[in-house]
Image (tube, grey):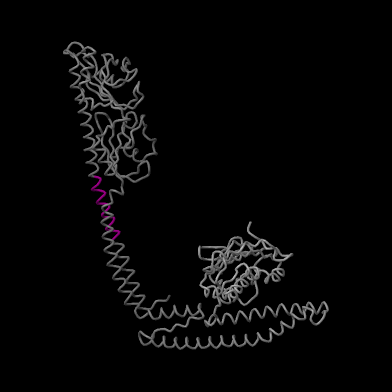
Amino acid sequence: MRLSLKGRIALIIMTGAVLTVVAVLLTVYHSLVDDLEQLHRQRQAEETVRAAEQVEQVLALRLNALESFSAQLSNGLNLDPMSQLLTKMERQRHLRRFFPDGLMVFDSNGTAIAESTLVPGRVGTNYADRPHFKRLFTTRKPVISHPIIGRTTGAPLVSFLSPILSDDGDLLGILGGVINLAQTSILPKRRLADALREGVTFRILDTDNLVYVYNGADLSSELQPLPAPGESPLIDAALSGFNIGITQDENRQQMVFATTHLEQLRWVFVRAVPYDQVIAPARAFFLRFAGISVLIGGGLALLAFWLAWTAMRPLEFMTRQIRRMATQAANNQQLPETGVTEVAELARAFNQLTAERKALSEVKDDFVAVVSHELRTPLTSINGALKLMQSGAVGALPEKADNLTLLALRNGERLQTIINDLLDFNKLNAGKLELAPKPCCIMTLVKEAIAGNRPMADDYRVTLCSATAPVPSAYLDPLRLRQVLDNLISNAIKFSPPGGTVTVRVEWHLPDWLRITVSDQGEGIPEAFGGRLFERFAQAEHGTMRASRGTGLGLAICKELVELMEGRIGFYNRDGAHLWVELPGAVSSDSTEHRIIEDMSDDHPICTDR
């Protein structure tokens, strides 16, 4: 559509305003995101250090408690007897909460001699070859092991050891506490609960052994090695030396992370938050800001358009009306003669043209009706005379004369059908066609329609079949329903290939609706033509030739008659075209017709449902 000068100016102003608003919004958004990222990185680093310190404090608290208890297990010269060791361990309920997976006492050689939690085979096992035992033998100080696999339990463990020393500083034994990583997290439960609620994930990495101390997911029953390089960008970033940054986790979700070290254990502590969660406040603020900006800009744009197009609206309405007139022959709606002077004059001229078009259409319809009526009377006489000659009323005709007479009769009947279609269509357009409904036998009408169209089917080498379900008699106009059936059946015959079958199916579609479907085995109705199938004078094309001959009024008349009977008509393609008619109502449920299974004649069987 070509724009006027006012329209172009309004469009340029609106486009410039929209681009300016978009540029401002993008600048504001990026500035907000950058500031929020920087702020959250600092906060992430602080939270990571705070969480790591809390873990270190909990580990130190457990180790100090173990060290305090180890001083109670000797008299300064020797270890307490076994019975006393077990009794003292039994009383240490608070310490056992620190080490829910058991307390153990080892002799000076690292052999287990007592335990608070019975594990078969653990007492009597020597652990002196373990690295943390060797470190304790050397330093005579409390130690915490790296994640290890229990020698007898097979579970992932972290072992705490405290030496039991004599008054002279000799090693009398070792007190151990065990945390099973498959059952107890190294992180405090409250910290884990808060992290889960806030969407935060933790990782604790043992960089010496390249295993997880805590993998941020469910507790595992075995030690989990760190991912191979490239499998987890988050772990790669944590081990690369960067203390803070943005990367992806194992699921390729973008994360803001920070790391710190637990120096005593040489563990790397990682805290990560989803990037979307970080920028969520900026996004929410931006959406509010953008919404307000769009509302204001939209209001201004609407005002500009309203001012620019106020004078153009009548022209748009005229354009739509002209298009409707081009596609709907009966549409002669007048235009309002309002608006500026030029537009009002144009509407007045258009209304004058519409009135002349309507008068011309009425003259054309009257002319067609008169001519058709005048032609029908002599044509009826001609066809009657030809039928008498064909029946032998004037005696036997020579073969050539008989063939010519038959050809003339067929073309005369075809011409009479065209004239009847024109008359019916004019009556329908004028609203003068009245129905005469009465109780009628649907199957009888179908049977008669098939019999009446059989000569045409024989000419086209097409088989006619009926596939019906038991249906009650309907209260309809039998003459007009027969006219609909004849049109649908003859149309299906024309579009069926030689040797094909046309099937008429009668069934209940809904509780109160009767459906009649006429199906052929042709190529179906072209998709591009489907919207015009029931328009007057419309015919589908087949390749470069028309698929059939005729006026193109048959289906249009069917549509008008079905709608006059308060029914519906339509089609669908499935191995051929299927045209259906749905009609409402039935007289009684006890007047059910039986499925037709007998032959209509000796030569032409009626096909039934299988």
Vertical placement of 542 versus 347: above or below? above
Q: In this rendered view, identify the residue nearer to me: 490 or 50.
A: 490
From the viewer's perspective, tell me whether residue 44 is left or right of residue 376: left
Reply yes or no: does residue 35 show up in magenta.
yes
Against 61, is 561 above or below? below
Q: Residue at x 72, y 70 (%)?
A: 459
Please tell me which residue is depicted at 18% across the width and 22% down the height of the picture: 68
- Residue 312: quarter of image: bottom left
Residue 79 in the image: state x and y as whole percent: 21, 13
Taking the view exactly as shown, the residue that stands out farthest to the front is: 590
Depth check: give the residue in front, 557 or 300. 557
Which quadrant would the C terminus be assigned to in this image?
bottom right
Q: Residue at x 51, y 65 (%)?
A: 512
> Is 426 placed left or right of 35 in the picture?
right
Chain part drawn in magenta? 25-41
What percent of the width, then of the height, locates residue 426? 56, 82
Q: In x, y percent, where is residue 228?
A: 39, 35
- Compare residues 568 and 222 and report the one nearer the observer: 568
Image quarter of residue 451? bottom right
> Which is the main secondary structure of the residues drawn in magenta?
helix
In percent of width and height, residue 520 lies at 63, 64
